[in-house]
């Protein structure tokens, strides 16, 4: 999402857990929202049960999960403004956030209510084509 030049609007509509919470925070600042009854939750990446795997497979998976965690911490640090140490501490146990909490934490910028219009007027397909200079066949 960081490489796309278009504005990215993100909206949390249910429960944004882990990587979904990270994606929610990665929208363009000022355009990140949650519905009023949505939840955001930070937690550490989890390693699936090992079962009867060989020790080397467990080691490989552990390294992959650690790499994912470090990537997530870097991205969340960039999108929320918190340093990685704070994020790591907060992710040690599940951190549930209601919309107001998520705003304070820097995950989102606002709450969508049924009466609020955050997107503005929606263009028709023909208007999009006209504005883009496309000709319909």
Image (cartoon, helix red, strand yellow):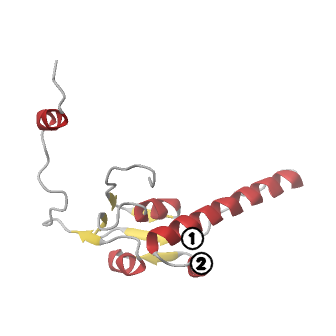
Dots 2, 1 in contact, CB < 8 A: yes
Q: Position of 53 compared to 38: left or right? A: right
Residue in the picture at 14% in, 38% down: 131
Q: Earlier in the sequence, mark 2 or mark 1?
A: 1
Q: Position of residue 72 (x, y in %)?
A: 57, 64
Question: Relative to the observer, which residue lies in front, 67 or 16?
Answer: 67
Packing grade of label 2 (10 A; few <14, some 14-19, many >=20) is: few
Residue beneath label 1, please? 43
Residue in the picture at 17% in, 31% down: 133
Q: Position of residue 40 (x, y in %)?
A: 43, 69
Farthest-out residue, right:
55
Which numbered tag is attached to residue 93? 2
- Up-down relation of residue 29 to residue 121 (above or below): below
- Up-down relation of residue 40 to residue 90 (above or below): above
Q: Secondary structure at mark 1?
A: loop
Q: Secondary structure at mark 2?
A: loop
Residue in the picture at 61% in, 80% down: 85
Q: Position of residue 106 (x, y in %)?
A: 40, 75
């Amino acid at each position: 999402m960081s490489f796309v030049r278009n504005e990215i609007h993100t909206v949390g509509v249910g429960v944004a857990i882990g990587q979904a919470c990270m994606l929610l925070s990665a929208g363009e600042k000022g355009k990140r929202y949650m519905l009023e009854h949505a939840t955001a939750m930070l937690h550490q990446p989890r390693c699936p049960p090992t079962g009867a795997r060989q020790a080397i497979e467990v080691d490989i998976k552990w390294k992959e999960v650690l790499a994912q965690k470090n990537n997530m911490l870097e991205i969340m640090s960039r999108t929320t403004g918190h340093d990685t140490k704070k994020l790591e501490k907060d992710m040690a146990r599940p951190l549930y956030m209601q919309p107001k909490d998520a705003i304070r934490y820097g995950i989102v910028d606002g709450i969508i209510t049924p009466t609020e219009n955050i997107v503005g007027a929606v263009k028709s397909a023909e208007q999009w084509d006209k504005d883009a200079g496309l000709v319909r066949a």
